[in-house]
Amino acid sequence: MLPSRSTLKPIIWIGSSYDDLRAFPECVRKDAGYQLHKIQAGLEATDWKPMMEIGAGVAEIRLRDRAGAFRIFYLARFEDALYVLHCFHKKSQRTPFKDKTIARTRYRALVEHHRSQK
């Protein structure tokens, strides 16, 4: 059972990540919402892996349907929120350099922002 809404971490969408997720097919969006809800509640996504090459604490949710593979890079290590760094449709076996670069740039800006707030 998932906790009530009041105990969930808020989601903060970085850059175009929210609009990118909205471009996913409906069934993938629904699954993405469920997986993000689990993470907000402090649980693990069903299919995920760490993405240390993006940054410390970054992970990716792996989603699939008939249209292919979809990925969400996120950071949940900060207490204040769940940060969605990048969402994209993966069209090949390897994660494209462009998508890694987008996520890495957003990660660095987020970490710098958190450091400056202290």
Image (cartoon, grey):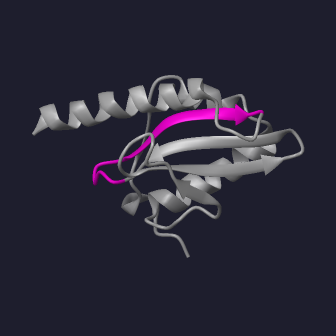
Q: Judge whether 99 appears above or below 29 on screen.
A: above
The residue lying furthest to the right in this view is 66
**Residue in view at x 48 percent, y 32 percent:** 103
Q: How many marks?
A: 0
How far across and how far down the image is residue 86, in percent?
53, 33
Q: Is residue 83 magenta?
A: yes
By secondary structure, the bulk of the magenta-drawn segment is best described as: strand
As drawn, is 79 to the left or to the right of 31?
Answer: left
Tell me which corner region of the image, top left, top right, bottom left or bottom right, holds residue 46. Answer: bottom right
For this view, does 51 lie left or right of residue 55? Answer: right
- Measured from the top left, where is residue 114 in percent x and y? 21, 37
Question: Does the magenta-highlighted stretch encompass residue 106?
Answer: no
Which quarter shows the N terminus?
A: bottom right
Residue 103 vertical position relative to residue 29 in the rendered view, above or below: above
Residue 106 image position (x, y, % from top left): 40, 28
Residue plotted at (68% across, 39% down): 94
For residue 22, which quarter of the picture? Answer: top right
> Foreground: 20 or 52?
52
**Left or right, 23 with reference to 19:** right
The part of the chain drawn in magenta is 77-91
Which residue, as the protein is rendered here, is positioned at the far left?
A: 118
Q: If the image is split into quadrants, where does the C terminus sit?
A: top left
Residue at 46 percent across and 63 percent down: it is 41
State the image coordinates of residue 62 (x, y, percent, origin top left).
Answer: 66, 51
